[in-house]
Image (spheres, rainbow, N blue to C red):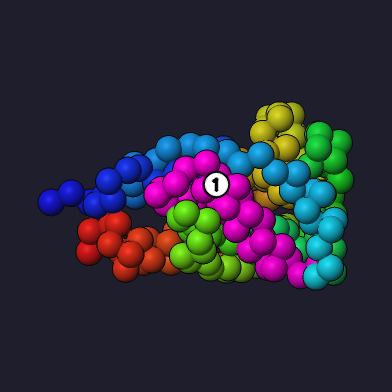
Amino acid sequence: MALWLAPSALILASQSRSRRALLEAAGLPIEICPADLDERAIEASVANPDPAAIAALLARLKAQRVSAGRPDRLVVGADQTLALGSSRLAKPADIGEARAQLTALSGRTHELHCAVAVIADGRVLFEHVEAAQLTMRQVSPGFLDDYLAASGSAVTTSVGGYQIEGRGIQLFERIEGDHFTILGLPLLPLLKFLRHHGSLAS
């Protein structure tokens, strides 16, 4: 029996390697079509600075942008925001900004808010937001230097400057929350929706 039942592959409106890997590992056929959005401009224009609301908005807008050019296709959008107290962090622009973010996170607990949206023909079929709490250990400047040197430009691809599925796990002392959510996609709720929708075998 086939696992994927829809006539066409699921479109992922993201160039995230982590999200693609999660979906492919789950057995879903994926077509990559990144959305062309100025995320920082959108964030700046939002009256409600709530990190969960911003993650949900960006996930929805990404999927809607791609859906406009892909009629009759299921499009998945996802986004993740990081909240450190009342501050929100975006993806670091360079190594220096990654260092600043990691220094700010060192010894403190922050929240990751991860959202997913499924759009077809411009209509929102599914939306979901989850949060996880991560506590970074007190990291010495020397360890941070070594981490940044070893990780290179990869630190600019994720908010906070780390990937827990790799060397970034060395930065943490406690993690509370769903593993997939931390990696950038609330996978279990998405799979549940796809089964309910009839696109995925149950």
> Residue at the spot x=68%, y=68% of the render?
52
Q: Which residues are magenta?
A: 49-78
Looking at the figure, which quarter contains the C terminus?
Answer: bottom left
Can residue 72 be found in the magenta stretch?
yes
For residue 16: magenta? Answer: no
Q: Is residue 16 visible?
A: no
| Residue that appears at 79% across and 42% down | 92
Q: Type of residue at label 1?
A: Ala
Instruction: From this view, report whether residue 126 is shown above or below residue 23.
Output: below
Which of 5 and 146 lies nearest the eye of the viewer? 5
Work out whether residue 51 can be spotted: yes
Q: Is residue 16 left or right of residue 4?
A: right
Q: Nearer the viewer, residue 119 or 151?
A: 119
Find residue 163 and report its horizontal and vertical position in percent.
62, 45
The residue that disc 1 covers is 68
Tell me the element at label 1. Answer: loop
23 relative to 148 in the view: left or right: left
Q: Residues within 10 Å of mark 1 (few under 14, many from 20)?
A: some
Q: Residue at x 51, y 63 (%)?
A: 124
Looking at the rendering, which quadrant does residue 133 occupy?
bottom right
14 and 181: which one is in front?
A: 14
Residue farthest left in this picture = 1
Q: Is residue 172 above or below residue 20?
A: below
Residue in the image at 86% along x and 36% along y: 96
Task: Tally the marks.
Answer: 1
On screen, 190 above or below 41?
below
Q: Nearer the viewer, residue 184 or 62?
A: 62
Left or right? Give the position of 16 relative to 103.
left
Left or right: where does residue 147 sit relative to residue 169? right
